[in-house]
Image (cartoon, rainbow, N blue to C red):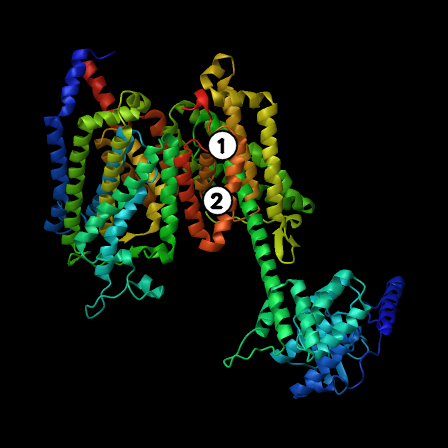
């Protein structure tokens, strides 16, 4: 085992030396004569069994970079047979080399690539994983170890044991131990099998569940697949452990997605709640303001790609203020031109704003086309972090949760610690009284409407990171955000927050049982029932301001 | 200028009457004129100056269904102040109820034996689900047309009005209701054809549904239903009940203090309205030959509201005019400038609410008032 370690050290040294010399040879192999002459010859023949042997032999010369690159080239179909004992391969950079010593070479006309069938391909994958277990790169080793977890048999077990002895990284060791247990599940010794089953149970990965469950299976005559009762017991315990872990993951996933959906709903409904609380008017064009926000993100992305490609990853940050300003302006124009004339007639306002929403939608269609436009996640928002060994929390959803918290904080500050907020609250409570004591209601209406619309714009940018951006974007959120507002009630930020998170959470909890559509219907019915009990929402205004 | 007590009394007595004689003549004359159109279509060959194209007849038939729905909506919005954004649901339910009968009539194999509609075959169902029972009988289907929207409206209305949900809250809840129903009907497993709904109808009571005679019959049935509904709605609104409803609309709390319980009044007019809407849907489906969950989309329901608003809410005749005018415009625009139709519709929404709170009928009345003032 020590040999392997010293050998690795030697490889590393060679590589370092090469880099230091800045050798003209691009990525020359570390050791020249890695492959015995004639070893590869059966590959050119017709005997699949012999080919398989060659492949497993290549895999077992663990850690030889030449063997590795031969295997890789073979897997890609870029290993060429020229003559007996002479093979050429095309490496990853597309350069041709001699398979024996790695010297650069020309491809002769009579060279033919080695053909593969599926069986050979599988063998190559296994062998590659085996030889990658000894790679210098921790990540490559980890990947290989994870891959080895699916392989069975003595050969694999031996290879894993060998790798385990020389492995230092705790993460890779852990993966290797699981791989070892997985390989040992076939061992003839019941004690080894039992230990393996226990180890797999500790690993808590769904991937092993079928294999463990197979041990517990009974055939027609009632005999178990696994003869030893102790092993069966261990396997059953392991299956239970895995199942429990899976259900934890599922619930955590539901919670996360519920939270994420809740914050999307919150963002979509927050602006609506402000305008609704202030004027008692439901702004049917709110969904279209979301849509405009999303299109601003699209325009920002285009501008950045066009004029500042180096900064293209940060277009989202620039899109936020842009969207706020644009939608706030649209909202203020809407308030001054239409809504102002309809105060005290909420139902008419509802219709007029619906008309506005139709026109905005058609306008966006005329400018950007009826098709969805492509808004990409910036690189720092794509991907995700894996927790609990199987639950992926995507960065864009995490970012939206954080963002919605920030927006709620911003709105809370604005409403509770600024003069405008004071006025808004005063008007929400009693419009005519506020007017009497000198609150400029007209201006506050306009500004508050602008604020609500601006928040819709921010929400639109957030939505553009989650799904499709098209002229119909707002419609999808229209009914949902109404539900949030109706449930949350007027004039309380807390009501909106709780209603949004509650609806999002319930939706995602219901989904696995009843499917997405029925979950949505259930939610709507629940809201209708809820409003029976509390017609003014969660936090109804009490006293005189209640109608 | 405030009307004097005597004129108010006079008006009150006036209101008891169903229509003034002049209005009777006008309504019946227009109805007779409309009734002639399919006859002109059938009696004269195309090319003849008196010929009316089948397209025009079909279009008018469709518009009259819309008008019936708008009339129903006006009954609740114009007279009881309940703005429903979910009347499309009742319309579609009536349509689906009739569609079930039409589907069964169309699902007949080559040798005349009944078989399952294709969408059920795709689902691998072996028999009709229980709620399709008896729908092969026309009269039972007609019962469903009235019953399904009626019962749903009654239950929903009972709970909604009992907890005093009103104003925009009620509007939003009705919108959610139709949205939820739309999602439900989009599912294939619901058993109503999913996305595609019902189509491919062949016969109605044994008559070929595409034959000009059948179409004329449907047209006349629609006209009769519309006329009947107009008279019925007028009778309701002219009665004492109608005046209580106006009280509900204008000052519900005051009415409550006076000792009226608005629940029953609201519930009655709400259910009646849903029923009418269901009938409109049932007449609509065989004429257009398709019903799908798209009819339940919130957009459609709001569009119904704009018919009423354009024509003039609380006038009964107005919604009929409004449904005709808006849909006429829509037909013209979507064929000539399809990309501008939504702008126009949006403008109609905004301009009627801003400048024509009483709609076309209100405008006409104002013009008439000005004329008579000039004369005086």
Point 35% across, 48% down: residue: B294
Percent x, y of residue A462? 57, 42
Mark 2 or mark 1: name the one nearer the start of the chain: 1
* Tag 1 residue: A273
Q: Quadrant of residue A392?
A: bottom right
Q: Is mark 2 on a helix, strand or loop?
A: helix
Percent x, y of residue A369? 47, 46
Point 63% across, 77% down: residue: A228
For this rendering, which residue is in front, B17 or B64? Answer: B17
Percent x, y of residue B272? 23, 38
Point 73% across, 67% down: residue: A176
Give the class, few, some or many, for how many residues have Cα within 10 Å of label 1's Cα (few <14, many ≥20).
many
Q: Distance between the residues labelled 2 and 1?
A: 19 Å
Q: Can residue B310 be seen in this view?
A: no
Query: Image check: B134 left or right of A86?
Result: left
Q: Is mark 1 on a helix, strand or loop?
A: helix
Disc marking residue A473: 2
Query: Image check: B291 left or right of A271?
Result: left
Give the class, few, some or many, for how many residues have Cα within 10 Å of label 2's Cα (few <14, many ≥20).
many
Count the labels in the image.
Answer: 2
For this rendering, which residue is in front, A500 or A101? Answer: A500
């Amino acid at each position: 085992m020590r040999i392997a370690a010293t050998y690795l050290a030697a490889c590393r040294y060679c590589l370092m030396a090469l880099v230091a010399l800045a050798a003209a040879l691009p990525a020359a192999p570390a050791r020249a004569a890695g492959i015995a002459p004639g070893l590869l010859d059966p590959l050119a023949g017709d005997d699949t069994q012999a080919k398989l042997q060659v492949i497993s032999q290549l895999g077992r010369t663990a850690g030889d970079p030449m063997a590795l690159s031969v295997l890789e080239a073979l897997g890609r179909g870029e290993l060429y047979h020229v003559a007996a004992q002479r093979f050429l391969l095309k490496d990853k950079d597309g350069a041709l080399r001699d398979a024996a010593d790695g010297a650069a070479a020309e491809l002769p006309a009579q060279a033919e690539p080695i053909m593969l069938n599926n069986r050979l391909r599988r063998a190559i994958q296994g062998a590659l994983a085996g030889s990658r277990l000894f790679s210098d790169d921790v990540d490559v080793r980890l990947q290989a170890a994870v891959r080895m977890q699916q392989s069975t048999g003595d050969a694999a077990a031996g290879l894993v044991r060998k790798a385990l002895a020389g492995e230092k990284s705790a993460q890779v060791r852990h993966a290797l131990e699981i791989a070892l247990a997985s390989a040992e599940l076939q061992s003839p010794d019941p004690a080894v099998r039992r230990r393996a089953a226990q180890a797999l149970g500790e690993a808590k990965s769904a991937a092993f569940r079928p294999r463990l469950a197979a041990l517990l299976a009974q055939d027609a005559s009632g005999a178990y697949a696994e003869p030893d009762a102790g092993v069966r017991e261990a396997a059953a315990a392991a299956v239970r452990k895995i199942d429990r872990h899976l259900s934890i993951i599922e619930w955590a996933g539901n919670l996360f997605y519920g939270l994420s959906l809740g914050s999307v709903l919150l963002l979509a409904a927050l602006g609506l709640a402000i305008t609704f609380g202030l004027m008692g008017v439901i702004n049917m064009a709110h969904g279209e303001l979301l849509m405009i926000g999303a299109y601003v993100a699209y325009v920002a992305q285009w501008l950045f790609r066009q004029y500042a490609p180096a900064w293209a990853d940060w277009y989202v940050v620039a899109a936020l203020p842009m969207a706020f300003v644009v939608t706030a302006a649209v909202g203020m124009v809407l308030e001054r031109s239409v809504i102002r004339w309809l105060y005290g007639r909420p139902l008419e306002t509802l219709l007029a704003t619906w008309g506005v929403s139709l026109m905005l939608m058609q306008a966006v269609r005329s400018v950007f086309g009826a098709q969805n436009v492509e808004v990409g996640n910036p690189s720092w928002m794509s991907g995700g972090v894996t927790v609990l060994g199987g639950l992926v929390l995507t960065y864009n959803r995490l970012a939206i949760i954080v963002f919605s918290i920030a927006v709620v904080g911003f709105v809370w500050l604005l409403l509770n610690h600024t003069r405008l907020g004071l006025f808004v609250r005063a008007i929400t409570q009693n419009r005519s009284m506020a007017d009497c004591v000198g609150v400029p209601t007209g201006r506050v209406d306009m500004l508050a409407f602008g604020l609500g619309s601006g928040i819709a714009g921010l929400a639109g940018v957030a939505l553009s990171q989650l799904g499709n951006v098209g002229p119909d974007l707002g419609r999808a959120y229209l009914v949902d955000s109404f539900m949030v507002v109706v449930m949350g009630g007027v004039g309380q930020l807390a009501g909106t927050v709780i209603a949004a998170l509650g609806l999002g959470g319930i939706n995602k909890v219901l989904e696995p049982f009843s499917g997405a559509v029925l979950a949505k219907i259930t939610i709507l019915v629940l809201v209708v029932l809820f409003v029976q009990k509390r017609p003014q929402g969660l936090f109804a205004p009490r006293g005189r301001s209640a109608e | 200028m405030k009307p004097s007590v005597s004129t108010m009394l006079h008006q009150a007595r006036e209101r008891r009457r169903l229509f003034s004689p002049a209005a009777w003549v006008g309504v019946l004359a227009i109805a007779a004129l409309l009734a002639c159109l399919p006859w002109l279509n059938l009696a004269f060959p195309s090319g003849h100056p008196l010929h009316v194209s089948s397209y025009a007849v079909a279009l008018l038939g469709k518009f009259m269904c819309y008008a019936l729905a708008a009339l129903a909506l006006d009954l609740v919005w114009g007279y009881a102040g309940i703005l429903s954004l979910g009347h499309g649901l009742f319309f579609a339910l009536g349509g689906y109820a009739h569609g079930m009968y039409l589907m069964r009539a169309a699902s007949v194999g080559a040798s005349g034996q009944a078989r399952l509609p294709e969408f059920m075959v795709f689902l691998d169902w072996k028999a009709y689900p229980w709620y399709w029972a008896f729908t092969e009988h026309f009269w039972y289907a007609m019962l469903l047309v009235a019953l399904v929207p009626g019962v749903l409206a009654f239950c929903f209305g009972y709970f909604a009005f009992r907890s005093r949900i009103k104003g925009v809250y009620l509007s939003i809840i009705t919108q959610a209701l139709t949205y939820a129903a739309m999602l439900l009907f989009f599912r294939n497993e619901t058993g109503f054809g999913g996305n595609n709904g019902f189509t491919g109808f062949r016969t109605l009571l044994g008559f070929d549904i595409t034959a000009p005679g059948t179409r004329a019959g449907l047209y006349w049935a629609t006209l009769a239903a519309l006329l009947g509904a107009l008279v019925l709605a007028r009778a309701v609104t002219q009665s004492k009940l109608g005046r209580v409803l106006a009280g509900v609309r204008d000052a519900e709390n005051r009415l409550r203090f006076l000792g009226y319980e608005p629940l029953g009044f609201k519930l009655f007019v709400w259910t009646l309205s849903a029923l009418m809407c269901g009938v409109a849907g049932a007449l609509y489906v065989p004429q257009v030959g398709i019903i799908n969950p798209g009819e339940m989309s919130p957009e459609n329901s709001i569009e119904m509201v704009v018919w009423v608003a354009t024509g003039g809410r609380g006038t009964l005749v107005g919604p009929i005019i409004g449904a005709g005018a808006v849909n006429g415009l829509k037909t013209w625009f979507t064929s000539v400038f399809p990309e501008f139709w939504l702008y126009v519709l949006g403008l109609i929404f905004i301009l009627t609410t801003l400048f024509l709170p009483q709609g076309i009928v209100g405008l006409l009345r104002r013009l008439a008032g000005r004329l008579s003032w000039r004369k005086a």
